[in-house]
Every structure is written in C-alpha cells, then in structure tokens.
Amino acid sequence: MDLNRRRFLQFLGAGAVGGISTAVTPAEASSVENISDGYGVLVDTTECIGCRKCEFACNREHHLTDLPLERYEDTSVFETERWLQANAYTVVNRHPNPENAAKPTFVKSQCLHCLDPACASACLVGALQRQENGAVTYDAWKCMGCRYCMVACPFQVPAYEYGNALTPQVRKCTFCASRTAQEGGLPACVEMCPQNCLTYGKRSELLALAHEKIAGNPELYQDHVYGESEAGGTSWLYLAARPFTELKFQDIGPEPIPHLTETIQHSIFKFGALPLMLYGMLGAVMRIAKGGHGRHAETTAEEEVS
Amino acid sequence: MKYLIVIACVITASAFPSAAQEHPAAGAEVPACITCHVSENPTEQDAALKACPRPNAEAAPAHESSESPDFFILDKLSDIYVPVVFPHKLHASMTEMGIGCEQCHHNNPPGPILGCSACHETKPEQANLKQPALKGAYHRQCLGCHREWDHETDCVVCHAKREPGHPVALPADSTDIMGMLHPNIEEPDIKVYKAEDMEGTPFVSFHHREHVQLFGLKCTACHQRENCSSCHNSEQQALPREREDPHQDCVRCHTEQVNNDCTFCHAETERPGFNHEQRTGFVLSTFHEGVTCTQCHPQKGAFTGQKPECNACHAADWVPTKPIDHAVTGVALDETHAQLGCVDCHTGGIGTPAVCEACHDEKPDISKWSTNAAPVRVPAPETSAPVEEHKGTGAKRYD
Amino acid sequence: MAAEISYAPVQRRFFTPGVYVLLALVLTAMALAVYRFIFGLESVTNLTNQYPWGLWIGVDVATGVALAAGGFTTSALAHIFHRKRFEAVVRPALLTAMLGYTFVGLGLMLDLGRYYNIWHPAWPTMWQGNSVLFEVGMCVMAYLTVLYSEFAPIACERFIGRVNLPGRLASWNGIVDRVLRSVNGTLGRVMVLLIIAGVVLSCMHQSSLGALMLIAPYKMHALWYTPILPLLFLMSAIAVGYPMVVFESMLASRSFGRKPEMDVLTPLSAFIPIFLGIYMVTKIADLLMRDAYPLLFEGSFQSFMFLLEMGGGVILPFAMLLSSRMRRSSRMLFSASMLVVLGVLINRVNVFIVAYRPPHTQSAYIPSVAEVLITAGLIATLMLVYRVMVTLFPILPKEHPAHLPGDN
C-alpha cells in the first residue's frame, strides 16, 4: 500500500511540478563572466555636440517618423528632458554644464543592450533575447504584451505602443541587427554621427579603448566607463567629463539585475525539489491528521489509491 | 592671383589621399614609432595605433600663420552638400592665440604639415577604433571650437545645400574678419586718446563711427592684416588694441597732417565730430542729406572743397546717381515730366527755375501739382551702382 | 466528506436592489472593455512607458490572487489537517477561489497588449524558466485546472440523478448522467492528490507573485523592496485566507438574509492572529534588519501608504482579533476581517504601484476613471456570478429551518 502510494505521489509530483522544473533546469542562472564578447558602442559624450543626427538616422532606419533633416536642428527640444518612446528608439538630451555654460553636455540615450538583460530574464515567453553579437532583440510574434520587461528594465528603455489595439509591440533600439549582420555594417546612428562620438566594435576592445582614453586625458574624463559594470555590464559604454549622475544616468550597481530573482527561482524550483518536498510533507500531515481526527470520517479516493 | 592660390590649395588637398597610402610621416624625418603606435613593430595590417591624443596635442613643427594657404576646399564626403570652403589662413591666425598649428595638426611628425586624410580613414568601417574616421576628424576639428565659440552646429553653417551647377563661392578676403563668422563687433562712437607727451594738447578725439558711416571706410582700411590674437587672449577675452606707432592707422590717409600739423588731431579738449556746416558753411540738410562724402568729394584721402554754387556740381550734363524725389523741392512731378531730364526744364542749370515755355506755349498753372500728390521718382540710369551696405552692421556669411 | 454538513442551493429572491447596482457596474465595464479592445489600451488607461503596470495588475491580478487564498487555506485546514468542523466554509471558499482566479485571467486579458497570445507560456518552445512571471503563469494555469476539478464534483452532485434535458435532448439524459457519474468518480479518486497539489501550487505562485517586483531593485521604494518579498507575499496570502472567508461568508449571509455562521467563523478566526502575527513580526523584523525603518518618517506618500498598510491592515486587526470577545462579536469580526482584506489590498497596490518609482518619469500614474470602472465591473461580475452559483449549486450549508429571517 505504501509503495503504491509513494509511486503515485511521485508520478503526480512529476506531473504537477516537474513540467515546470524541466523548463527551468536547462536555463542555468547566467553569469556575466561566461557571456561571449559581443559587439558594443562606445559613446564619448565629450565629443557630442547635440546635433541629433543619430535620432534622424534611427528614425529613418526604422521608419519611425519622417521629419526632414532640417527639423532636427531645432534645439528648442532640449528645453525639457525627452525620453525613449515607441516612435523614438534614441533621444539626445542636453545637460547644463555648471563649469562652462557655453559647453553643455549632450547624452544620447537608447537601449544599452545589457550583457545579462533584465528584460530578457523577465520575459516569460522568450520574446526578448540577447543575441551572440550583443544585441538584445525582440520577437513580436512571441510577445503577449504583459510589459513585465518594461517593469524590469533598470534603464527604463522599452516603450509600448499603447495606441495600437490589435498588434501592439514593445519598442526599443534594435542595435540595427540587420545592418550589422552585413560585413562592415554599422548601426545607423553610428554611421551618421558626424563627430564620431559613437565607436562600434568588440566590447572588449571598446573597453580597452575607453580606459586608454581616460588614461590619456585624466583631466578631461571621469575615471569611470558607464556600462562596464553597471547591471553586470552593458554593450553600450559611455565616457563623460562630468559625474554620470549629473547627466541623469541611473546609479546602478554591478550586480546583474536578474540575479536575485533567478537565484530564488532556480534554488527553489531546481528539479522541483522544494515543491515536491512540500507535497510530500502535506501528504504525510494529511495521513497523520486523518489518523487523529478523521478516524470516523468518510474517506474518498485515498483508500482506493492505496 | 587669388584664384591661383585657391587652385594650388585644392591640388594640395586632393593630393593627401595618395599620401595616405604611404606612411603619413614618409618623406620627413621619421619620429620614434611609439609616438603614434602602441607597438614597436607596427605592420600595415595591424597598425596598433594609440588612442587619438587629440586634446593633448604633442609638438608639431613651428610654422608662421602667414605661411599657410588661404583656403581649402573640402569635398571628400559631400554628396548632399556642396564642398566646404575652409578659410584656412583665418583659422591659422586664430591658433596664434593658442598653441599654434598643432592645435589642429595634432601629432604631426616633423616636416611638412599634413592634412586630416593623411591619417584618418575615409571609410568609417575601415577606420581604426582608436581614431575617428575622416568625417569625424573634420567635424571634431571644426565643432570642437565652434560649438563653444558661436554655438553654430547646424550643417548649413559650413555646408551649403547642394544645388546642381552651383559653383563654389569663395569669400572675398581671408583677413576680413567681419565677413567671416565673427560675432558682431560693437563699433565705438568715439575714442578719445590721451597723449601724455603732448603738453597742452593731449587729447586726440577719434570719431570711429564717423569714419565708417560718414566717410565710408571699410574695416580693413585701418584694421589691416589683423588676426584673432591681436584682439583676443587665449580665453577669447577682448584685449585693448596696441600699435607700435600710434599714428600708423591715421597716416595712411592723413599723411600731410600727421607730418606737418599736430593740431589736426591733438587738441586741448575732446573735440566734437565732423559737422559739414561748421567746417564748410554748406548746409547738407534737405537736398544733400544721405549723400556720402565721396559722391561730392571723389578724391581719396584729403577731401578737396567744392564751390557752393549748385551748377558747380549739377552741370548741364549732370544725371542723378540714384532716384531723386522731386517733391522735396515743393513740386511733385507727374509721370510725363518725371521722364524728362533735369535740364529739359531747368534750362539755366540746376538750381534755376524751370522754364515751361521751352515746351508749352503758355506757362501752365503748376500750383495744382500739389506736393502731396503721389511722388514720382526720377529714375536713375541703370548703370548706377547700388549703395554698398556697411559690413559692420551684421555678420555676413558666405553660405 | 459530507457526513455532518449537507449543502444546498440558496433559495432566495435573486434580484435585489444591490444586484441592480452590480448589473449597472457590469454593463458599464463591459462597454468600456469593448472600447478598450477596439481602440487599444491608450484609449482607456493612464498607463505610460514608465508605468507599464497599473490598477489592473495591482488590483485585478495581484490582489485577486491574494484574496483567493481562502480557497487553499481552508482546504488545507479541513482536508489536510482534518479539522472537519470547518467543512462548512470550504465550498464557498473554493467557489471564491475559482471565481477569483477566473477573474484574474479576465483582468489579465484586458491588460495584455496581445491577449490572444495568452497561451504562449504554455507552449514548450516558448518556455522561459528564468522568468518569475513564467512560473506564476504556469502555476496559475495549473491551479485554475485544479480548482475547476475540485469544483466539478459539486456541479455533478447537483445534477446526478436529476438530469433532465429539455425536449428532444431528453433521450440523452441517461448518457449525461453516466458521464457525470464517471467524472465524479474519477475526480473523487484523485481528489486527495488534487487538494495537496492545489496547496502546493498556491504556495508557489503566491510567493512568486512577490518575487515579480524583485527584478526592479532600483525602481522599488526601500520600504517594500526586500529579498524576502516572496515570503512576505506567501505569509500575507495565508494570513488573508481566513479573514477573506469570514468577510465573504458574512457578506453572503447578510445579502441572503441568513444568520452569520458564527459557530464556524469564530473558531476559524482564532487562526487569524497567529498567521497575521507571524506576518507582522516578519515584516517588522525585515524593516529593522534592513535598516529601512527611518524611511517610515520621511513624510512621503510612500511612507504614509506603508503606515496605512501596516497600521490599519495588520496591526489594528491583529490587536482586535487577539481578543476572543471580539471574535465572537459578528460586527467586530467582520470589521477586523475587512481590515485585513483591505490591508492586503493596499499592500498589493503598494508593492505594484506605489512603491514603483521609475526613472525618467514625466508624470505620476493615477488610474483613469475607466480603469477604476472596469476593475469595479470585474468585482461586480464576480459577485454576481457568485450569487448565481450559490443559487444554482449546493455550495452554502443547508439552513436550519429554525432561523429563516426575511430577505434582505
């Protein structure tokens, strides 16, 4: 009787919880160290003049708006902070420079393409995924529109097409995956930038370059490459002449954002151990309690099973 | 002559790509490899360049700004814009406020000064990560200063929109600061100098605005071969203008007076400005207002007097250089009479009454020609030159 | 099972003034929902790129799941711990849970941008085991199945031996009856396993629901952001289980003009201070250990909401229910239970909306009228369906004819 019962429990446990655990176990909690060296972009904000040509190039590439080039020379947009939207994958903001009013700092914002992206960890259907080349891409077909990715992103990047009733999408920088797939292809913004503020290349090389630049001109640059360690590292890296917090960069620690949730997920649900344990425990309690209280109570399936 | 220089420059500029095929420092004294390279043995495939040390320029060979070419035409990457005319000499003179040629020609090896494309790749995808491509290099050179200097970062400041068949327009004079992108210079009304060594008559009153507006002098008539550093320090603050000889600007026109008549300028007190009536007794109001000096006194330098009689100038063959509103005389002309020449009516010369009988049998009643009637302008001959606008009134661009 | 208690459909006038109010709310919400599906989320919600989750997630989904905890807590008590005296509340609690989760699904459908893809997490090629939401989704789906399976015998019980199809279909009566009997029999055989599975699944996703917001450490206010948020969610779900049963049972009694089942509810409420106390102590200890307590006095909206949640929703009802006199008073018990329910509601809203402070925000999120109306409409629908169900099926215990007060 006992044997039968145990087997049944195991069977049921496998059915109820095992299905979930099998989905979980192959996807081990990722650690940043063993992420392949993808591509990235180094943004040197000290060179940026706020011409917004990157916005133009991006909007043209992704058919977001059809404003003519001249309209991007309108500097009145800098009066208020602008942020990423469903039809703006990248925006440039101006930050006043207390030391030299004539030389404000401009910062281009877009998806940073994290090495361990919180959005991809959050997405329950795998619509957001980090590719080998470093790009975090979005598959609209898989997406169910829960917008958990937008909650998860520490940089507040993904935007949503709330106005679209039938096929809304999560919208963000694509890293111009179709362009970079070609030999020598550059992201649209990188290609357009007249100042070469944006350098596209292997992330490891860009990091080396960034540190070399800092060492070469320690008076100009902050001794910090934003994105080197933030949120476990991002593909886009930034250099700046002023503290990053003054430039409205998020102060994010080196821990990958999904670390905590994935640790909890995987330690609790590894092989479905904890749920199975609970299951077994409750089963045992049930038997004991029945012995104590329900001697006369009618039983249902249990006796038939055992 | 000017075009020859430009052509020479264009040729030099276009010669740079071929230079890029070889080592940038070829033909010159080759500096130590580690000046530019990380590795002691750089190869063509792996140049192992150092990160561009742009902000900390290293020594470049010393050259005088006067040695530099006047203009460069930058036409490497222009498909939507016309080539950029870069006033090189003007910029070279600016660098004298700073560190000289190496302000832009950073890391130039000893020998000839190299252009940007000697090191910077034309195609961004081929560029070394540590160096901006040519497009970035050009823009950083220009915008690195201009973003702070005049906040003009719009494309059209340098790039005129391409119109097919439109020739490249060169600015007239590479030393004409006001014709370039210089912000408005505030023109002083009067400058009073005090010459301490001139006892009794120490004050020299220089009426600056008068010289420009009344006498029609161009800035460059006095401000010859100026460059930025003669007015600005390296922080771009204005400096007082200093001359080796205080007479050097005046003497160009007032040669006679500077040599012989100190009191022409030096006086006991500050002097009022020029007043035609006071000086000559001839009132300029009504008919001669707005007439520039040189219209009546065409001789350059020392102005010669004119006879006060009208026909001294308005001789029988006199034609107005610009339309005259006859109504200022109290008689407005109708269309028929506006077509006539001055002496057709004023047979005795200008200033004499009109003689109607020359055409009409009897004297008509001209009192009905009210001065309030719509004035009909006497047209000027087509050959007359338009009045030149004074350049000091606004920065003019050659875009 | 039903040795001492027998259940029966409620026999009372269905349409009361209250029902008409609920119906009005339902119809308004339905119209707005149609509008939302035609013109998109933007047309009815105040959601932004910065605030992707609003009232519907905070209340309809998160609170909905928490308040459905009565189902698994009572079934654990009555079936696993064999406290048979509480059988009386198991069925209504089960119904509440079943309807609660169904409406969680409905609320989610409204909120999802691509609601037609709601089945995607169940499709193996799209499984994404790193996602907390995936685990929540799978558990909720599984638990919903369990709930319906647990409920099916009740439906069967109503019709077995009484199948009476109209007109020509009457010839099918025998077959339907046999099907019902076989379903009942099969489910009866595995019911024990389903009951345990239900408890396990509940524990899993109740806690995971708390883990959801752990992915936004830099956006969450420190008063709520704690690594033990999943544990707190589980504890608060367990703590709110019995108060919810009490609250809902008394509400139903009042609505149907029945006498409150104080003989069951008073002993049941004796458990509340235990679970609520554990939750309270854990939450306070967490606040102290993380050194987050100074934030209580920062005077912000967040600190006010936290104090409200803890003071009004946990500490006050905890203190009230400590006294057995209070537990015996139907009025006080109802008030205390309602406070706990509201406390958990505020907690979920706090965690999902108030504590969430994203960067680059132009304006704070305040739910639109339409969002509120749709949420109200969903709750109204749930209450109506509950009323229909207890009228149709044997869910509430059979009344003793002795006390049958007038309809309310």
Image (spheres, coloured by chain):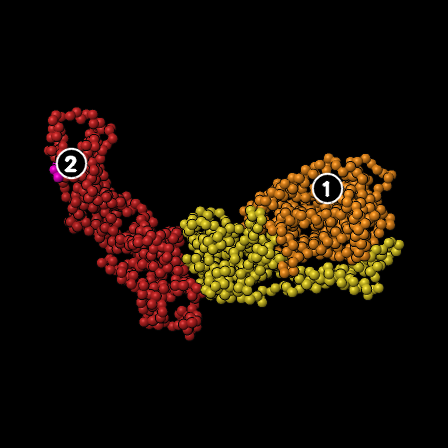
Q: Position of residue C237 (x, y in %)?
A: 72, 51
Q: How many marks?
A: 2
Question: Which shade is chain C?
Answer: orange
The secondary structure type at the circle numbered 1 is helix
The residue labelled by disc 2 is B341
Q: Which chain is red?
A: B
Toward the viewer: C250 or A250?
A: C250
The residue labelled by disc 1 is C384
Q: Quadrant of residue A117?
A: bottom right
What residue sits 34% from the left and 55% below the top? Answer: B82
B315 is within the stretch colored magenta: yes
Q: Which residues are magenta?
A: B310-317
Q: Distance from label 2 to label 1 (Cα)?
A: 104 Å
Taking the image as shown, residue A3 lies to the left or right of residue A264, namely: right
Say what amino acid the circle numbered 2 marks.
Answer: Gly
Say what amino acid the circle numbered 1 marks.
Answer: Leu
Q: Is residue B186 above or below residue B52?
A: above
Q: Position of residue A176 (x, y in %)?
A: 50, 59
What residue sits 84% from the left and 64% below the top? Answer: A1
- Residue C329 in view in this figure: no
A113 is within the stretch colored magenta: no
* Mark 1 residue crowding within 10 angstroms, few (<14) / some (14–19) / many (20+): some
- Residue C83 in view in this figure: yes
Question: Which shade is chain A?
Answer: yellow
Q: Position of residue B272 (x, y in %)?
A: 23, 40
Q: Is residue C20 above or below residue A282?
A: above
